[in-house]
Amino acid sequence: MTIQFEYLSNKIKLFAFRLIFLLFILFIILMYHHAFPCQLCFNTIIEEPFKQIIPWIGKHIFQFSYEINVFPNSRVDTPYDYIKLLIIIFIAIIGSTIWIIYYPEQANNAKLNYWLFTTIRYYVALMMIHYGLLKVFELQFPYPDLITLSETYLSLIHISEPTRPY
């Protein structure tokens, strides 16, 4: 009984490791966060299928009443990015399931673990450097110019459609 439980426990741990591995690698590759310098070159190629798939998923599966904006945005809290993250999670689950079925043995997990942690370390370090450079050189929130300071507050708000009272 304990041998079967230990075998099942090892399979669950192996599946969880492979799921986390695929999840992080796909997140780093597919979600563009300005971390790697060469990522912008590949992002234009990678984004094209998502620009077709994500509006379809939003309209037919999630039944959004509005059209999803697929234009690049500096924010990451848009429906486009949420659906993209759900697609990454779905691909990671399917990929780790296929991986555990076709390669059930624990080959090279130490190497995968090393490369996973190394990739995450570089990703976090480059993200911190990017964030720090934005703050040091005031690229994220620059000082307003004199014309902006002389305008009224309502003219600075860009509302695409009128808001309804709640």
Image (spheres, helix red, strand yellow):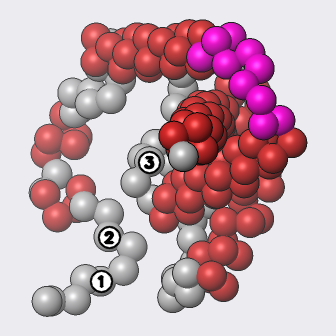
Which numbered disc, 2 or 3, marks the residue closer to the eye? 3
Binning the other alpha carbons within 10 Å of mark 2 as few (below 14), some (14 to 19) or many (20 upward) gives: few
Q: Residue at x 44, y 18 (%)?
A: 124
Along the viewing direction, whichever of 32 and 72 lies nearer the viewer: 32
Are the residues tagged 2 and 1 within 8 Å (C-beta)?
yes
Label 3 vs 1, first from the N-terminus: 3
Residue furthest right as drawn: 102
Label 2, on which residue?
159
In what element is the residue under mark 3?
loop
**Mark 3: which amino acid?**
Val
Disc 3: which residue: 76
Q: Against 44, is 73 above or below? A: below
- Give the mark nearer the N terminus: 2 vs 3: 3
Is 104 included in the stretch rendered in magenta? yes
Quarter of the image holding residue 62?
bottom right
State the residue position of label 1: 162
- Nearest the viewer among 42 and 134 is 42
Comparing 161 with 8, the one in front is 8
**Magenta span:** 103-113
Question: Is 92 a magenta residue?
Answer: no
Q: Position of residue 15 (x, y in %)?
A: 62, 41
Q: Quadrant of residue 139?
A: top left
The answer to whether one can see residue 130 in this image is no
